[in-house]
Image: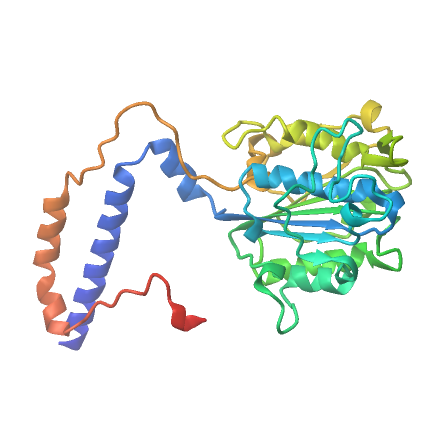
């Protein structure tokens, strides 16, 4: 008798799930349903790091704040952006425009803006904190805003800028992170199911050396220069006496500024934003760990926030045409529920007792 009741319950649950899935998808466009069922991407995060200090490195903070502005414009909220800035150029005594940072000499856009949320500032920007952030091993008491709360469905953009060399990136002009340490941190992320796909983007001298040790899957990497090459600045602002932005980031931003949240630009187009005659250095790209064709990957898969929607101009019928059939099925199976004396319990929408 007990075995019979178990079989009845299994059949009921399978029937309900199958019916529910059929009812849910039957009203949606076929193209959207296909993409949702195939995709494992559910959310977007960005880790943006300026690792250098001192006034003459003004361009590095302009680099990272410009990328920050772009990903926010395309839909990634501040709650899913971790911004690390090693120096505060906006409040530097040498800054003739206090509280402002610009990425071009025409002073068109103040990239520091009014709503910049810096998560790690000054001497908090260390190799240890960066590795802890990626691997989810932050110290007790770390604020939620300083954590990378990703999961197996997260597409993560990691952008690094500063001074580097063959196999390393300097932090604070006092310590270094090596390409092997980066590879180990990313490997831990994969083992802990902390990302679905990862875009590793770095603008520094000999930048391509930083992704050489990667072995984890689903990584697309782009670097501003190959091993043995310098990554160059774009232009200087005579009024403040420093370079404003690096060449690779300048042309990347020029491309990103044309992208709209519902645009059709692809990652393949983005990987070509800075040809050698513009960057002077040779942009490095690594695609062997990435399973998708970049020409089929929307750029907003990394620089934006996912929007599983499809815009249509016609009228959509959202009534449950088969509601009566569903009720009939449930009535036929009611006896199984009564025999097993089961009670359905719904999870709280906001489980406050879990915190």
Q: Position of residue 17 (x, y in %)?
A: 26, 54
In the picture, measured across the screen, residue 101 lies left or right of residue 232, that is left
Total tally of numbered discs in the picture: 0
Rendered residue at 61%/58% (across/down): 190
In the picture, measured across the screen, residue 37 lies left or right of residue 142, that is left
Closer to us: 105 or 305: 105
Res 349 visible: yes
Answer above or below: position of 349 versus 268. Answer: below
The quarter of the displayed image where residue 174 is located: bottom right
In the picture, measured across the screen, residue 97 lies left or right of residue 236, that is left
Please name the colour scheme applied to the rendered image.
rainbow
The quarter of the displayed image where residue 100 is located: top right
| Rendered-image quadrant of the N terminus | bottom left
Residue at the extreme bottom: 2
Rendered residue at 29%/23% (across/down): 314
The quarter of the displayed image where residue 104 is located: top right
Q: Position of residue 184 (x, y in %)?
A: 72, 60
Rendered residue at 87%/50% (across/down): 54
Answer above or below: position of 186 versus 67. Answer: below
Closer to us: 196 or 5: 196
Q: Position of residue 180 (x, y in %)?
A: 79, 58
| Rendered-image quadrant of the C terminus | bottom left
Res 281 visible: no
In the picture, measured across the screen, residue 223 lies left or right of residue 295, that is right
């Amino acid at each position: 008798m007990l075995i019979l009741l178990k079989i009845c319950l299994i059949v009921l649950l399978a029937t309900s799930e199958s019916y529910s899935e059929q009812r849910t998808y039957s009203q949606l466009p076929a193209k959207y349903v296909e993409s949702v069922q195939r995709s494992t991407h559910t959310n977007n995060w960005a880790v943006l790091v300026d690792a250098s200090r001192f006034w003459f490195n003004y361009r590095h903070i302009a680099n990272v704040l410009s990328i920050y502005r772009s990903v926010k414009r395309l839909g990634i909220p501040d709650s899913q952006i971790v911004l690390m800035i090693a120096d505060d150029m906006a409040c530097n005594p040498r800054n003739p425009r206090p509280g402002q940072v610009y990425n071009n000499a025409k002073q068109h856009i103040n990239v520091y803006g009014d709503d910049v949320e810096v998560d790690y500032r000054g001497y908090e920007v260390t190799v240890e904190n960066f590795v802890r952030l990626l691997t989810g091993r932050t110290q007790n008491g770390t604020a939620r805003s300083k954590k990378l709360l990703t999961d197996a469905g997260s597409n993560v953009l990691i952008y690094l800028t500063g001074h580097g060399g063959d196999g390393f990136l300097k932090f604070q002009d006092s310590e270094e992170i090596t390409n092997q340490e980066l590879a180990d941190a990313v490997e831990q992320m994969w083992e802990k199911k902390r990302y679905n796909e990862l875009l590793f983007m770095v603008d520094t001298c000999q930048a391509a050396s930083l992704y050489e040790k990667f072995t984890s899957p689903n990584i697309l990497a782009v670097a501003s220069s190959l091993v043995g090459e310098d990554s160059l600045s774009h232009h200087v602002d005579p009024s403040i006496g420093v370079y404003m932005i690096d060449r690779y980031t300048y042309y990347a931003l020029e491309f990103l500024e044309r992208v709209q949240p519902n645009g059709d630009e692809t990652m393949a187009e983005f990987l070509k934003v800075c040809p050698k005659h513009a960057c002077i250095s040779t942009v490095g790209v690594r695609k062997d760990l990435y399973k998708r064709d970049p020409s089929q990957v929307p750029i907003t898969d990394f620089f934006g926030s996912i929007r599983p929607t499809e815009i249509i101009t016609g009228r959509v019928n959202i009534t449950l045409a088969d509601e009566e059939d569903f009720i009939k099925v449930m009535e036929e199976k009611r006896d199984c529920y009564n025999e097993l004396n089961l009670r359905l319990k719904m999870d709280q929408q906001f489980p406050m007792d879990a915190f």
